[in-house]
Amino acid sequence: MGQENILESILQELKCISKAIRELRETLTVAVEGRDSAAADRGVKQHDMNGNETISGDSVKSTYDRYRAALEHVRYEGQLLWQIFHAFLLAHTVFLSFLLNSAFRSGSSGYQPAVFFPGLLGLFLCLPWFASYLRSSAYYKFRMAQAKETEPEDWNIIGGKGEQFSRGLPVTIGDECYRIHWLGRILRTKRSVPALILAFALAYAGLVIWCGPWW
């Protein structure tokens, strides 16, 4: 009986020791994880098993914040670009439609001051329209370059594959190849928008010639 009691006591002690070791291990694990998390939050430089420095948490967060801010600027400049362009487009469309209706109401060419002078004005107003587009598109390209510079490596959102796709080059993601249609590659925004403005300018010039005082 005495030996059985001793064995039971030893087993109980071993169970208590095992439980204590398990609790200590859990405590150490939580402490290590908390230390790593706190170090990441403070931006403390850490090292891997080879002794190489790893990027700190604040550094990564700062990079992401800069990239997010750069994308916000890109989005803002893009929206501003198209808002200004649409405002000019709507005004010129209404104005040109009115002049075309007035010019061809009679069906014959001749001097029409009510069309000739507004036509000159419309032709002149194509210049600030084109200038505003150049300015806004330049800001957009600048913000895009900033976002590309702050983008983390291997993200391929704006730079890398994203840039290749925007240039019309084939890009493979997974097992599928993506590429802009050939018509989209020819009629890029930087070509189609100036072409549209030029079309309005030619229409105004045609009205000026059609309704000028030389007839």
Image: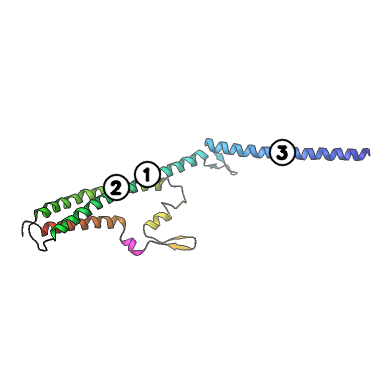
Vertical side of 136 occupied by 31: above or below: above
Question: Quick one: label 2, few (<14), some, or many (20+) residues within 10 Å?
Answer: many
Residue 73's label in the rendered image is: 1
Q: Residue furthest right?
A: 1
The residue carrying mark 2 is: 136
Give yes or no for residue 89 being in the magenta stretch. no
Q: Position of residue 142 (x, y in %)?
A: 34, 46
Question: Quick one: label 3, few (<14), some, or many (20+) residues within 10 Å?
Answer: few
Q: Quadrant of the C terminus?
A: bottom left
Residue 27's label in the rendered image is: none
Tell which circle, 3 or 1, labels the residue nearer the N-terminal end: 3
Q: Nearer the viewer, residue 152 or 53?
A: 152
Give the Cα separation between the discs numbered 2 and 3: 63 Å
Q: Quadrant of the N terminus?
A: top right
> Looking at the picture, which amino acid does disc 2 mark?
Ser
> Looking at the picture, which amino acid does disc 3 mark?
Glu
Give the Cα separation between the discs numbered 3 and 1: 51 Å
Q: Position of residue 145 (x, y in %)?
A: 37, 47
Residue 23's label in the rendered image is: 3
Q: Nearer the viewer, residue 172 or 4?
A: 4
Give the Cα separation between the discs numbered 2 and 1: 12 Å
Q: Residue at x 29, y 55 (%)?
A: 190
Q: Residue furthest front?
A: 105
> Looking at the picture, which amino acid does disc 1 mark?
His
Question: Quick one: label 1, few (<14), some, or many (20+) residues within 10 Å?
Answer: some
User: In the drawing, does residue 149 fall left or right of residue 1?
Assistant: left
Q: Residue at x 71, y 38 (%)?
A: 23
Whether tag 2 and tag 3 are in contact, CB under 8 A, the answer is no
Instruction: Give the residues in magenta.
Output: 179-187
